[in-house]
């Protein structure tokens, strides 16, 4: 694939857009890590009552909840927080 030549004006416009998108991503990440120290928010969903209670109990016992994906399934673990 040959490199396309662009004008300096277009290059400046693209650099400005990249800086804007990087700033938006930084702000989004900063907001998420404030809510979840040391982690990154990915998605929220409503679990079943049984799953929600298991999470609540594990959290009440001071465990960190870890989610792992493998072979089409999500596995939820309660890990002792250190």
Image: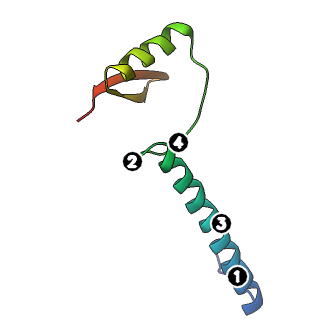
Give the Cα distance between marks 2 and 1: 41 Å
Given this view, does label 3 or label 2 mark the residue nearer the observer? Answer: 2
User: Callout 1: helix, strand or loop?
Assistant: loop
Disc 2 + disc 1, Cβ < 8 Å: no
Q: Give the image quarter of residue 43.
A: top right
Residue 29: x and y in percent read 54, 54
Q: Residues within 10 Å of mark 1 (few under 14, many from 20)?
A: few
User: In the rendered structure, which disc, 4 or 1, sits on the residue that comes first in sequence?
Assistant: 1
Circle 4 residue: 41
Residue 12: x and y in percent read 70, 86
User: Callout 3: helix, strand or loop?
Assistant: helix
Query: Which label was assigned to residue 4?
Result: 1
Give the Cα distance between marks 2 and 4: 10 Å
Q: Is residue 44 above or below residue 72?
A: below
Circle 3 residue: 21
> Which residue appears farthest toward the bottom when viewing the image?
8
Disc 1 + disc 3, Cβ < 8 Å: no
User: In the rendered structure, which disc, 2 or 1, sits on the residue that comes first in sequence?
Assistant: 1
Residue 74: x and y in percent read 46, 23
Residue 5: x and y in percent read 71, 87
Circle 2 residue: 38
Between 12 and 32, the one lying in front of the other is: 32
Disc 2 + disc 4, Cβ < 8 Å: no
Q: Give the image quarter of residue 45.
A: top right
User: In the rendered structure, which disc, 3 or 2, sits on the residue that comes first in sequence?
Assistant: 3
The colouring scheme, among rainbow, by chain, secondary structure or one colour, is rainbow
């Amino acid at each position: 694939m040959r490199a396309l030549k662009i004008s300096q004006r277009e290059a400046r416009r693209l650099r400005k857009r990249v800086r804007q998108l990087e700033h938006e991503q930084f702000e989004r990440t900063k907001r998420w890590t404030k809510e979840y120290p040391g982690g990154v928010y990915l998605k929220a969903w409503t679990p079943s009552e049984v799953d929600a209670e298991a999470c609540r109990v594990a959290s009440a016992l001071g465990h960190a909840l870890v989610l792992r994906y493998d072979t089409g399934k999500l596995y939820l673990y309660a890990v002792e927080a250190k």
